[in-house]
């Protein structure tokens, strides 16, 4: 069996190769976002007791850049293998293939005509949409906002225009030099101030607003794969329901990702006699900080200025916040 032409193979552990193969252009200096967001995404879950040759990083990186992924185990692969699959037979009443061809992540054939029930399908999310696609869409928007911000900052550096005589220019340059040396006073011709008529440059979007839009896009990006990100609004301007709504949105996405992994781990363990365990790294490392952020927001709204986290030790292992 040969890989079909409609399958793209690439070294997705090499991001330059991935972007080139997928014809993704225009990231420029935003590779830092790719690094940060992809690292965050593939670090959210870990696994214990994986088959030989598999690591948590491999599993999560595969799920971040691929769909149509499955786990397969037979006499040729007694330790099991994660590979991609292509339907090669009829579909049942629920649009599931009856038979599939298996291909390694690097594009090498594994087996053909395998009954669909002989594999365990792996999903990152219930819709089986490749996470990197949505992350890259957000990064494109972040790039646009950053470009706008850079133009605004460049526009702010345009020298101001004034009208006046050469003598007034000399006095004004003396005034600027005193500003650099922090001198509190300067002497100038009384007519100098009247003669200085500055052109009014107005930004299409104020720099402050641009920064807020940029922060919102950054927050929405991580929220798209289940990471909580606080609002750019000050806590006193937020109501409790808004704080909870932001958390609920991220929690729903995270819970779906967790359920998908818990389901395929359960199926692998039952079908192939494995003892794989799921570790929620994101929950362990960050959920406590979310609780503290919510408590702080509520305390600020109530004009308390501070709060006491009395239940911190009692509830540190709880998922509900």
Image (cartoon, rainbow, N blue to C red):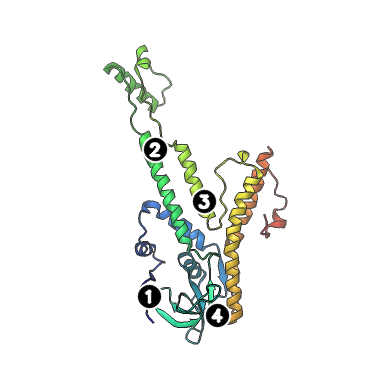
Q: Earlier in the sequence, mark 3 or mark 4?
A: 4
Determine whether the residue tagged by mark 3 lies in a helix, strand or loop.
helix
Assign a secondary structure to mark 4.
helix
Q: Report crowding for label 3: few under 14, some 14 to 19, many 20 or more residues within 10 A (C-alpha).
A: many
Q: Residue furthest bottom?
A: 75
Q: Are marks 1 and 2 in contact (CB under 8 Å)?
A: no
Counting every numbered tag in the picture gives: 4
Q: CA distance from mark 4 to mark 1?
A: 22 Å
Q: Which residue is mark 3?
A: 220
Mark 2 or 3, nearer chain start: 2
Looking at the image, tell me whether mark 1 or mark 2 is earlier in sequence order: 1
What crowding class fits label 1: few (fewer than 14 Cα within 10 Å), some (14-19), or many (20 or more)? Answer: few
Residue 150 lies left or right of residue 42; in this view the side is left
Q: Give the residue at mark 2.
A: 152
**Residue visible at 53% across and 58% down?**
225
Q: Is residue 164 left or right of residue 298?
A: left
Q: Is residue 289 visible?
A: no
Mark closer to the observer (3, 4): 4
- Which secondary structure lies at badge 1? loop
User: Which of the 4 quarters of the picture holds residue 284?
Assistant: bottom right
What mark, if any, has residue 117 been given in the picture? 4
Q: Position of residue 70 (x, y in %)?
A: 50, 74
Q: Which residue is at 65% across, 52% downward?
A: 291
Q: Are marks 4 and 1 in contact (CB under 8 Å)?
A: no
Asked which quadrant contains residue 9, the reply is: bottom left
Quarter of the image with the C terminus is bottom right
The dot on residue 4 is: 1
Q: Is residue 279 above or below residue 193?
A: below
């Amino acid at each position: 069996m040969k890989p079909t032409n409609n399958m793209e193979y690439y070294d997705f552990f090499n991001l330059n190769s991935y972007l080139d193969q997928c014809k993704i252009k225009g990231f420029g200096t935003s590779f830092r976002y790719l690094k940060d967001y992809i690292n965050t995404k593939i670090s959210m879950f870990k696994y214990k007791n994986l088959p030989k040759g598999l690591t948590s990083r491999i599993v999560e990186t595969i799920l971040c850049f691929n769909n149509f992924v499955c786990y397969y185990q037979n006499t040729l692969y007694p330790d099991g293998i994660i590979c991609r699959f292509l339907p090669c037979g009829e579909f049942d009443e629920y649009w599931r293939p009856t038979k599939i061809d298996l291909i390694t992540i690097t594009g090498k054939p594994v087996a053909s005509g395998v009954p669909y029930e002989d594999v365990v399908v792996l999903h990152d999310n219930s819709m089986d949409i490749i996470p990197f696609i949505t992350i890259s869409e957000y990064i494109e928007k972040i790039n646009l906002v950053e470009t706008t911000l850079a133009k605004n900052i460049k526009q702010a550096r345009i020298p101001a225009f004034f009208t006046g005589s050469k003598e007034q220019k000399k006095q004004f340059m003396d005034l600027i030099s005193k500003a650099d040396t922090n001198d509190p006073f300067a002497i100038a011709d009384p007519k100098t101030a009247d003669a200085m008529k500055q052109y009014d440059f107005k930004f299409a979007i104020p720099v402050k607003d641009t920064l807020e839009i940029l922060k919102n896009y950054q927050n929405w990006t991580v929220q798209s794969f289940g990471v909580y990100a606080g609002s750019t609004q000050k806590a006193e301007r937020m109501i409790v329901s808004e704080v909870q709504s932001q958390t609920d949105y991220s929690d729903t996405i995270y819970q779906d990702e967790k359920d998908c992994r818990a389901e395929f781990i359960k199926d692998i363990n039952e079908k192939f006699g494995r003892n794989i365990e799921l570790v929620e790294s994101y929950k362990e490392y960050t959920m406590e900080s979310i609780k503290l952020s919510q408590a702080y927001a509520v305390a600020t709204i109530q004009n308390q200025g501070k709060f006491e986290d009395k239940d911190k030790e009692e509830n540190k292992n709880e998922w509900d916040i």
